[in-house]
Image (spheres, rainbow, N blue to C red):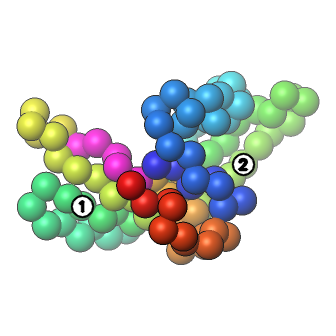
Amino acid sequence: MFYLQEGEIIKGIENIRHTLESFISMNGKIESKVDAVIHISDIALVNTEWSFNGTGPDGKVVTITGKATDVLRRQSDDNWRILIDNPWGTNLHICMKSDHYE
């Protein structure tokens, strides 16, 4: 799952990829700093501060910053994969309803 700042929940790899195309097209650089990790078994909650600098379609510099909260799961090959990516941390504009859960 991926949360947009506007509160929309995006599910599925192809849908997430499509949603992020305009972001990726800015050919920017993203930097992040891990602030905290709560790790239990094969699940981790990770809080980070991040910044992105790129170029918008109008040629102007685009700078975006945020504090993310992500949930990761360790895979059988010991790599970690993101289950839930919330780039806006606790600054959510969504109404959590039961239909958001699977």
Residue at 48% in and 68% down? 98
In front of the other: 62 or 44: 44
The amino acid pointed to by label 2 is Thr
Q: Left or right? Give the position of 26 relative to 37.
A: right
Residue 48 visible in the snapshot: no
For marks 2 and 1 on the same chain, the one whose residue lies earlier in the sequence:
1
Seen in the picture, residue 25 relative to 10 is either above or below; the reply is above
Task: Give the number of the mark in front: 2 or 1.
Answer: 1
The residue labelled by disc 2 is 63
- Side of 44 where 42 appears, left or right: left
Residue 27 forms part of the magenta stretch: no
Region of the chain picked out in magenta, as a range: 80-84
Q: Residue 83 magenta-drawn?
A: yes
Please determine whether, in this image, residue 8 is positioned above or below residue 58. Answer: below
Going by the numbered disc 1, the residue's amino acid type is Ala
Tell me the SS state at disc 2: strand
Instruction: Identify the residue at image location x=34%, y=46%.
Output: 82
Q: Are marks 2 and 1 in contact (CB under 8 Å)?
A: no
Residue position marked by numbered label 1 in the rendering: 44
Q: Residue at x 63, y 69 (%)?
A: 94
Q: Main secondary structure of the magenta part?
A: strand
Q: Position of residue 53 (x, y in %)?
A: 66, 42
Q: Residues within 10 Å of mark 1 (few under 14, many from 20)?
A: some
In this view, the residue farthest toward the front is 99
Q: Position of residue 96 (x, y in %)?
A: 55, 71
Q: Is residue 59 left or right of residue 85?
A: right
Residue in the foreground of this view, choosing between 62 and 20: 20
